[in-house]
Image (cartoon, rainbow, N blue to C red):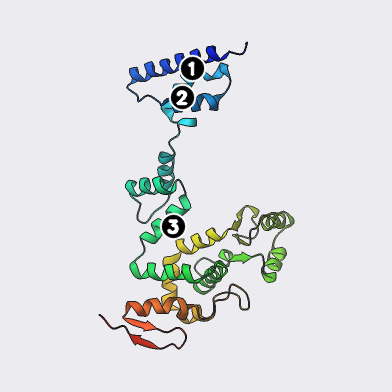
Amino acid sequence: MAELNIVEKANKIISFRKAIRDICRKKGLEYPSDAKIAEYIADCGGDECVYDINDFMGDYESKIGVFRDPLEDFKAEIKAISWSTPPTEEEVTAFFEKHGNDIGLFCKMHTIKKMKPLERKVYLNVIEKCSVPQLVGLWNCFIEESAIYGQDSHIFDLTFKEDSELLNDCLNSDQRIKIHALEYNGIRYLHCHFLNDKNNIKGYTDNDIIDTITAYWREIFERLLVWDEIYNNSVGNKGTDQEFNGFFDIVVRPILLKELGYEFDTRTFDIKEIKKS
């Protein structure tokens, strides 16, 4: 088929647009915008396939291809998550309009919003005061102390000789190749859930570490309240950038005492009552 000249293409597009409007009118559907029709034509490409009205209406009515509604897709993803307190449709829409379809950010913000006031205050102070390596140290301390999830929930640090040697001893050559690829791409942390399963080796970014702490914060918070001495002395590998000696006294205790009406000096350990104005 000979290539259409610009006038012939224009006439075809006008006729195509008219046919779309006629069908939409008969079916009681809202007309697609000219911009969407143009996007469809550009996405389809090729004069022979572009102007099939049945193909167009199939995509348009089924909301596929260029007619996908990203907000509806986002709502569906949110709905598929198992929530203890599901977010409202208004919350989801408001988030989407401001932040787009960032599922991870939505989950984190929703989780923080649903925290109890004291739980949230301690969480926010932990996120502010701790570096990412220290958060890894906190997570591993929680895994070891609580024994809730087992040692295969440990997050490995590829900059630590001990972690690298353990992984090399436990993994086969294919698994080690995957880890080297993650390391080559700048991944420092990884989770190896069942050491005999290559598919469960997952690299962790800094944001993934923060998201992990956020997702499990309620359980971590409860353990902090009961086993404060462990979390004061055992957060992070000693002599590394994960170590946070005095974590509980520096990060957690001041918030708890402030809620009780006391000010706590983390240097001298002095406590004094906060005078009400």
Between the residue at mark 2 and the residue at mark 3, the CA separation in whole angstroms equals: 37 Å
Residue 46 in the image: above or below residue 122 = above
**Disc number placed over residue 13 in the picture, else none:** 1
Please tell me which residue is depicted at 61% across the width and 57% down the height of the picture.
Answer: 203
Binning the other alpha carbons within 10 Å of mark 3 as few (below 14), some (14 to 19) or many (20 upward) gives some
The residue wearing badge 2 is: 37
- In the drawing, does residue 138 fall left or right of residue 29? right
* Marks 1 & 2, CB-CB < 8 Å contact: yes
Amino acid type at mark 3: Lys
The N terminus lies in quadrant: top right
Amino acid type at mark 2: Ile
Query: Residue reaching furthest front?
Result: 7
- Observer-side mark, 3 or 1, equals 1
Residue 216, horizontal then vertical, whole percent: 46, 64
Circle 2 — which element? helix
Residue 230, horizontal then vertical, whole percent: 50, 80
Residue 100, horizontal then vertical, whole percent: 44, 46
Amino acid type at mark 1: Ile
The residue wearing badge 3 is: 108
Please tell me which residue is depicted at 51% across the width and 17% down the height of the picture.
Answer: 51
- Observer-side mark, 2 or 3, equals 2
